Amino acid sequence: MTFDEMTQKLAAAAAAEPGNAKSLKLDMGDAGVIRIAGAVVDNQDIPSDCTVRVSKDDFEKIVQGDLDPTFAFMSGKLRVDGDIGVAMGLQAVVGRAFG
């Protein structure tokens, strides 16, 4: 899956659940950044309430069900900076986008 396809899928899922007022940045390193702020999804690398750092490959494994997000966090493949509650809210958007 391309980075643009990921952004589009997350945008469609976030539009279906625009109630979250906090912003989350999904930082995939060299692959790029996807920022979710309510129903707005873009690729701006600006400060957010929470930043989730994960490689594009590992993110793909997570959404495909090949990598458990908790294991990824505990093993350091996924890092969370900021409000972890915002990161927990990402599960619903990811589930809707890639489920």
Image: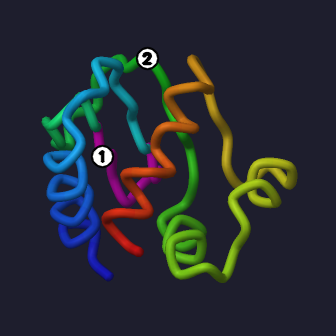
Find the distance from the CA under tag 2 to the CA under tag 1. Answer: 13 Å
According to the picture, the residue beneath numbered tag 2 turns out to be 49
Q: Compared with residue 65, is residue 21 higher up or lower down, i.e. above or below?
A: above
* SS for dot 2: loop
Identify the image quadrant of the N terminus: bottom left
Q: Is residue 55 left or right of residue 45?
A: right
Looking at the rendered structure, the kind of residue marked 2 is Asp
Q: Residue 6 colored magenta?
A: no
Task: Using a 10 Å C-alpha cutoff, classify the residue at mark 2 as few (fewer than 14 neighbours), some (14 to 19) or many (20 or more).
Answer: some
Q: Is residue 83 left or right of residue 97?
A: right
Mark 2 vs 1: CB contact within 8 A: no
Which residue is pictured at 82% across the width and 60% down the height?
71
Q: Nearer the viewer, mark 2 or mark 1?
A: 2
* SS for dot 1: strand
Q: Compared with residue 93, is residue 59 higher up or lower down, i.e. above or below?
A: below
Which disc number belongs to residue 34? Answer: 1
Which disc number belongs to residue 5? Answer: none
Task: Using a 10 Å C-alpha cutoff, classify the residue at mark 1 as few (fewer than 14 neighbours), some (14 to 19) or many (20 or more).
Answer: many
Q: Compared with residue 96, is residue 83 higher up or lower down, i.e. above or below?
A: above
Q: Residue 30 colored magenta?
A: yes
Q: Quadrant of residue 17?
A: top left
- Residues in magenta, as a range: 27-35
Which residue is pictured at 33% across the width and 24% down the height?
23
- Residue 8 is situated, as x and y percent measured from the top left of the image, at 16, 63
- Residue 13 is situated, as x and y percent measured from the top left of the image, at 23, 56
Identify the image quadrant of the C terminus: bottom left
Which residue is pictured at 15% across the width and 58% down the height?
12
Q: Quadrant of residue 41?
A: top left
